[in-house]
Image: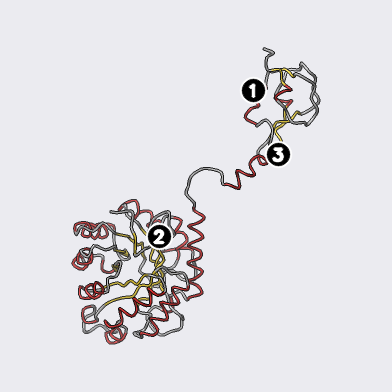
Amino acid sequence: MSKNLSIGERKLGSEHPPFVVAEIGMNHNGKLELAKEMIEAAASSGADAVKFQTYTTERYFSDDYSDFERRQEYELKPEWYETLQEVAESQDIVFMSTPFDRESVDLLEKIDVPCYKVASFDVTNHHLVRYIAEKEKPIIMSTGYSTHSEIAEAVEVIKEAGNQQLILLHCISEYPTPLERMNLQAVKTLKSTFETPVGLSDHSQGSTVAPVTATAMGASVIEKHFTLDNDLPGYDHAMSETPETFEKLTTDIEQTHEALGDGDLHPTADEKESLPGARRTLHWNGFYKKGQTITQNMILPLRPGGGMSVDELQYLLGEELAEDVEERSKIKRAQVDWDNK
C-alpha cells in the first residue's frame, strides 16, 4: 500500500501533523442551514475536513427498523451536496462523506469528493468496499467491530481493485468509549501489519488523551465527532466535541506532533549555543610545582566549559608540569611538559 498519500491538497505522513476530520455525521439533524453552520464552525476550530453520512434509508435499514422514519428525516438531500461542498471549499477544508450504498457512491462521485470513508460496520461488505476502491481515490476505513482477519480481507479487496491509497483507522465502536477500552496499541499493530498510513476514529469523551497518544504513535488521521451543542436532539450530539473542545483537541494534536520532532539524536541550535557553558573544563585541584607528575587526584572537572574537556584527562596523566600552577585554575596545555617521556 502507498505510504505517501494526499487528501485534496493536504499531504499525509509522519512529517505532517495528523489530518483532523470533524465527523458531523448526522448531527446536522436533516437541516441544511445547521449543516452549513457546522462546517464553518469546524473550520474555525482547526479541522482539516468535515465528514457527513450519505445514504438512502430504504437501502440502509429494513422496514421494521424501529427508527426508520427518523433516519429518513436525517438524510442529506441530494441537492444539498454541491452547496455543502462549496461551503467547505470557502472555508479551505475538505468535504467528505461515508457512503452506505452504491448509489450514494455515485452521488459523491458527481461532486468529485477527494476521498471516501468506509464505516466500521461495512468492513465485511466487500461489494461496497470494492465499488468504492474502483473509484481510485484515497480510502479511509474504520476498523471497529473487526477482527484481524476481517481487516486483512477488506485490505485485500481494495488491493485487488488496484487501489493502493488506504488509511486504516483504529476504532472502538462504543459511544462513548471508556479510555480503558481504547486499546491504542492497535494503532501500532495496524501500521506494522498492513504497512499503510493509520489513524484513530476516536469515540472517547471529555479528554484528548486518546488522539494525542495516537498522534505520538504515528497516526496520520484523527477523526472525532463534532457538534455545535451537546444538548441538541439527535443521535451523537451528547458524545461529540463542541467548537471549544474541538479547538483544544486540534491544538493538542498539533503541539504533540511538533514535540515529536524528527527522532535524530543531535543537539538543538540552542543547545549548541549553550554547550560550552554546560560542559565541564579541567581545573587544578591544588597548588602544584613544576616537574610534578600529574595524577588524577590533581584534576577537577568543573563547569562552565571553555578549556580542556573532560575526555582529554587521560592524556594528562603521567605527564609532568612545565610550570607551577594555581589551585582551581583552568588547566592549560602550555602548563604540561608533553616531551618529558
Which residue is painted at 28% across and 87% down in the image? Answer: 69
Residue 45 higher or lower than 180, as above or below: below
Spot occupied by residue 340 in the image (x, y as percentages of width and height): 69, 13
**Gap between marks 1 and 2 measured at Cα:** 55 Å
Mark with earlier residue (2, 3): 2
Amino acid type assigned to the residue bearing label 3 in the image: Pro
Which quarter of the figure is the C terminus placed in?
top right
Amino acid type assigned to the residue bearing label 1 in the image: Tyr
Q: Is residue 133 left or right of residue 27?
A: left
**Gap between marks 1 and 3 measured at Cα:** 21 Å
Query: Mark 1 touching mark 2, by CB under 8 A?
Result: no
Q: Which residue is mark 1?
A: 315
Q: Which residue is mark 2?
A: 183
Amino acid type assigned to the residue bearing label 2 in the image: Asn
Q: Is residue 317 left or right of residue 163?
A: right
Q: Is residue 262 left or right of residue 295?
A: left
Which residue is painted at 51% across and 60% down in the image? Answer: 255
Q: Which residue is mark 3?
A: 304
Q: Quadrant of residue 203?
A: bottom left
Look at the numbered disc 2 and give the secondary structure of its residue: loop
Spot occupied by residue 210 in the image (x, y as percentages of width and height): 45, 63
Which residue is painted at 40% across and 84% down in the image? Answer: 34
> Which is more toward the observer, 166 or 335?
335
Q: Residues within 10 Å of mark 1 (few under 14, many from 20)?
A: few
**Gap between marks 2 and 3 measured at Cα:** 47 Å
Spot occupied by residue 142 in the image (x, y as percentages of width and height): 32, 65
Query: Mark 1 touching mark 3, by CB under 8 A?
Result: no
Identify the residue at the far front of this view.
90
